[in-house]
């Protein structure tokens, strides 16, 4: 599977926007003051009022909405097996940023799990093979002696 530089650039922007959105939402929601005791439904109003008045939360929502729009665009010309795992690759960067930007405690087991997920995603992203799209958007079949033999068998039946 060959991926052009433009696609890689768009995927990197897509991943970066997801990271920024996640960090902004986390920071913004942690800053929300505790609601005061009150009648039923007061907590929901407090929560909604905070969400729609916090610049940090709104910026996070906008970043993630843009991230989702980019996902839709990417899926129109790139393979889902490339695009979706690329967002999962951000788990490593998100864990690093959560530790250093948000000052979260990240236990060793979480680091190991994050590294394992990232290694698996790297394997998926580096794997090349059949299934590339042709210009009409249809999937090409693998070529070579085995597929030629299969094609002859299918044609004969």
Image (cartoon, helix red, strand yellow):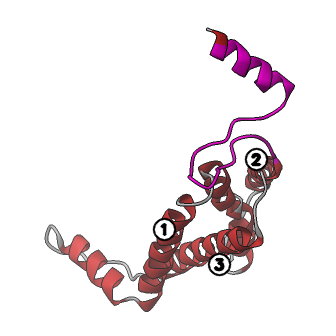
Residue 133 at x, y = what percent? 64, 50
Residue 44 at x, y = what percent? 24, 71
Choose the circle earlier in sequence order: 2 or 3: 3
Residue under numbered circle 3: 102
Q: Residue at x 67, y 71 (%)?
A: 104
Q: Residue furthest front?
A: 156
Residue 46 in the magenta stretch? The answer is no
Residue 71 at x, y = what percent? 53, 64
Magenta: main secondary structure equals loop
Residue under numbered circle 2: 124
Choose the circle earlier in sequence order: 3 or 1: 1
Q: Residue at x 69, y 64 (%)?
A: 90
Where are the magenta residues, as a range?
127-155
Tags 2 and 1 touching, CB below 8 Å: no
Residue under numbered circle 1: 68
Q: Which corner quadrant of the image does residue 110 belong to?
A: bottom right
């Amino acid at each position: 599977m060959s991926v052009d530089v433009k696609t890689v650039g768009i995927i990197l922007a897509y991943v970066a926007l997801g990271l920024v959105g996640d960090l902004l939402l986390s920071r913004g929601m942690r800053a929300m003051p505790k609601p005061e005791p009150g009648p039923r439904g007061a907590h929901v109003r407090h929560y909604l009022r905070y969400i729609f008045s916090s610049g940090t939360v709104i910026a996070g929502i906008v970043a993630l909405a843009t991230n989702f729009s980019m996902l839709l665009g990417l899926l129109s010309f790139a393979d889902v097996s490339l695009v979706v795992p690329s967002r999962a690759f951000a788990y490593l960067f998100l864990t690093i940023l959560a530790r250093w930007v948000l000052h979260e405690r990240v236990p060793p087991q979480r680091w190991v799990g994050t590294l394992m997920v990232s290694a698996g995603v790297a394997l998926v992203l580096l794997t090349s093979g059949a299934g590339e799209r042709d210009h009409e958007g249809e999937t090409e079949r693998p070529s070579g002696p085995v597929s030629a033999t299969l094609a002859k068998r299918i044609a004969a039946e």
